[in-house]
Image: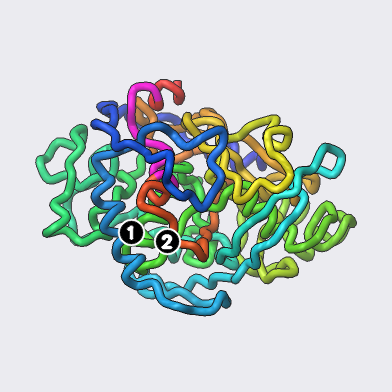
Amino acid sequence: MKFHPFFLASLLPCLAHCEEQPTAPEDSSKSSEANDYTVTVLPAAPATLPVADQLELTKRIHALIVEKAKEEGHEAYQLAIPKAADAPLKLVAIPGGEFQMGDPAADQPKIKLSPFWMSATEVTWAHYNPFYLNDPKFDKPRNKDGSRDLDNDRYTSEQPDLDKSTLVDAVSQPTIQYHDMFMSGSFANEKDYPAMDMTNHAAAKFCQWLSAQTGHFYRLPTEAEWEYACRAGTTTIYSFGDDASQLGDYGWYVDNSDFTYQKVGQKKPNPWGLYDMHGNVAEWTIDSFESDALSKLKDGTENPWFFPSKRYPRVIRGGSWDDDAEMLASTARVASHKDLKMQDPQNPNSVWYHTNGQHIGFRVVRPVAIPSVEEMHLFWNTDFISPERTAEDF
């Protein structure tokens, strides 16, 4: 990865230290082996659910989603996000099917995927700002774990009263930031640019926040879903073919980005109508990064998900404005690392921000099949504050 000299020079030094009281999740609820998961959890679903003290919140959001569910065709639609001043987000219908996953030079298992929707673009600041900036009417910052600070002690976790609080407000949301993610103007702070700099955890919680106000289940894509959607039925290096000289028509990368990200949706889409799958910002998936993932998948595996039992590494896909052409290939994958928090002034580091992640954003998916409460909870809570997770950042 290469950086423009000004970008490097503008990285801010540590400004302050903010101790974060790590807390382990409370007694976990059992995850039933008989539960019908809509995904194949690899190597297996965890024996207990993480962050069990938030399970009741998940149950109530799940009930909202089930209640709102109705017979409807699997067609593209435009979502107006209520808490984001009805900022529109287009969802593209991705058909279910089979594809051979991974680099053709390696063994390619044939994977089966169920139908889902995927956002046509990366989530933008118009969508993300209301989530990470929280409610401006509330004059107290969030606790370190994202819960509301009601006792004037940001180092303690507080569970909301779900009979008095709205579901949206009860979802954990980011703490205030202590760094300039826009690097003194090197990155535009405008609504049509992709949101970036967030951790995998923050992206997952955005999905829960979005679900709580819309009544539809949104989450990060699995790695298999991401590649399947990126390929859009193709078997070539890129979704438009093998000729890298055409890449500038479809994506922003190091040769045309001017060393920064660009507004979403300006380049040509892939065959299924998805924009910026190649470049602009690289994108989070919800999977653990397994270097030998393909060898662990058998032909016919349905909806695989490599469950992340640790904070690092997670899979990042698509390549970015700062990458060479080969990293924008449909099969290219990168592992997240603690160095993404290199400039974090907090000690311990924040669970919400990757201060060196101006090249990473995300898009959301919505599976057609509504999963169980347990599965929904897993997708929204693959990370949390605990001594073991905090130690991974050191």
User: The C terminus lies in which quarter of the figure?
Assistant: top left
- Residue at left offset 18%, top offset 56%: 138
Residue 380: % across, % down: 40, 47
- Residue at left offset 55%, top offset 52%: 221
**56 and 240: which one is in front?**
56
Please tell me whether mark 2 or mark 1 is closer to you in this view: 1
Amino acid type assigned to the residue bearing label 1 in the image: His
Q: Is residue 1 above or below residue 392?
A: below
Residue 184 appears anywhere in the view: no
Q: For numbered disc 2, what is the local secondary structure?
A: loop
Between disc 2 and disc 1, whose residue precedes?
A: 1
User: Which residues fall within the magenta stretch?
Assistant: 378-388
Q: Is residue 60 above or below residue 148?
A: below
Q: Is residue 285 above or below residue 367?
A: above
Is 14 one of the magenta-colored residues? no
Q: Which mark is residue 36?
A: none
Q: Which mark is residue 217?
A: 2
Q: Residue furthest front?
A: 34
Residue 164: % across, % down: 12, 59
Marks 2 and 1, how far apart at CA: 8 Å
Q: Are marks 2 and 1 in contact (CB under 8 Å)?
A: yes
Is 383 one of the magenta-colored residues? yes
Residue 224: % across, % down: 65, 49
- Residue at left offset 39%, top offset 70%: 81
**Lateral position of residue 143 relative to residue 358, left or right:** left
**300 and 325: which one is in front?**
300
The residue that disc 1 covers is 62
Amino acid type assigned to the residue bearing label 2 in the image: Phe
User: The N terminus lies in which quarter of the figure?
Assistant: top right
